[in-house]
Image (tube, grey):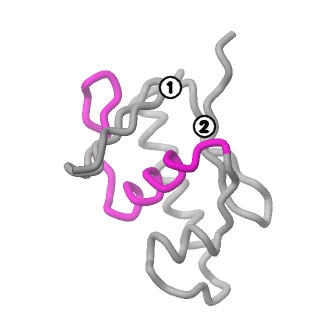
Amino acid sequence: MEPMLSLPGLEIYPDKRKVFRDRQEIRLTTKEYEILLLLAANKGHVLTYSQIYEKVWGDCPSGSENNTIGFHICNLREKLYEAAPNAPFTIRSVREVGYCFEIQAEK
C-alpha cells in the first residue's frame, strides 16, 4: 500500500488512484492522474517531456509527445483550478523542456 501524498491543498491516494481537495474528489482521467502523481512526487524538479512520456505511457518518445502531454496538462490544470482557484501550487511549463510541480512559498 502506497502512502498518501499530501501537498498544500491537495491529497493524492495512490492505492485508490484518487485526488482530493478539501475532501472533495477531483475527477481525473487515468493519464491526468498519472501525470499529476509523477509531477507531485518529483515536486520542485523539472521533468522533461521524454521522462513524463516514458513513465506515463511506458513508451519511447517519438518526437510528437510534447503536444500529447501538453493536452493532458492543460486539462489537468483546468480541473485543479476549478477545484482550487487559489491553490498554493502550480504546474509550471518549462519551455521546450517539460513541466515542474511547484508549491508557492508561504507568504
Q: Which residue is denoted by mark 2 in the rendering?
A: 90
Location of the C terminus by quadrant is: top right
Q: Amino acid at mark 2?
A: Thr
Q: Which residue is denoted by mark 1 in the rendering?
A: 85
Q: Position of residue 20 (x, y in %)?
A: 30, 34
Assess whether residue 24 is covered by the magenta stretch: yes
Residue beneath the point at 60% across and 70% down: 51
Q: Please tell me whether residue 30 is drawn above or below residue 14 in the rendered image.
A: below
Q: Please tell me whether residue 11 is drawn above or below residue 76 in the rendered image.
A: above
Q: Please tell me whether residue 40 is drawn above or below residue 29 in the rendered image.
A: above
Mark 2 residue element: strand
Q: Position of residue 18 (x, y in %)?
A: 26, 45
Residue beneath the point at 38% across and 38% down: 5
Mark 1 residue element: loop
Question: Front-most of 19 and 2?
Answer: 2
Question: Front-most of 28 and 58?
Answer: 58
Find the distance from the CA under tag 1 to the CA under tag 2.
Answer: 11 Å
Q: Position of residue 89 (x, y in %)?
A: 57, 31
Residue beneath the point at 79% across and 66% down: 96
Using a 10 Å C-alpha cutoff, classify the residue at mark 2 as few (fewer than 14 neighbours), some (14 to 19) or many (20 or more).
some
CB atoms at circles 1 and 2 under 8 Å apart? no
Assess whether residue 81 is covered by the magenta stretch: no
Check the image and name the residue furthest to the right.
Answer: 95
Q: Position of residue 23 (x, y in %)?
A: 25, 25
| Magenta residues (range) | 19-44
Q: Please tell me whether residue 105 is drawn above or below residue 69 in the rendered image.
A: above
Q: Amino acid at mark 1?
A: Pro
Question: Front-most of 48 and 64?
Answer: 48
Using a 10 Å C-alpha cutoff, classify the residue at mark 1 as few (fewer than 14 neighbours), some (14 to 19) or many (20 or more).
few
Q: Which mark is residue 22?
A: none
Residue beneath the point at 29% across and 50% down: 14
Q: Hey, which quadrant is residue 26 in on the image?
A: top left
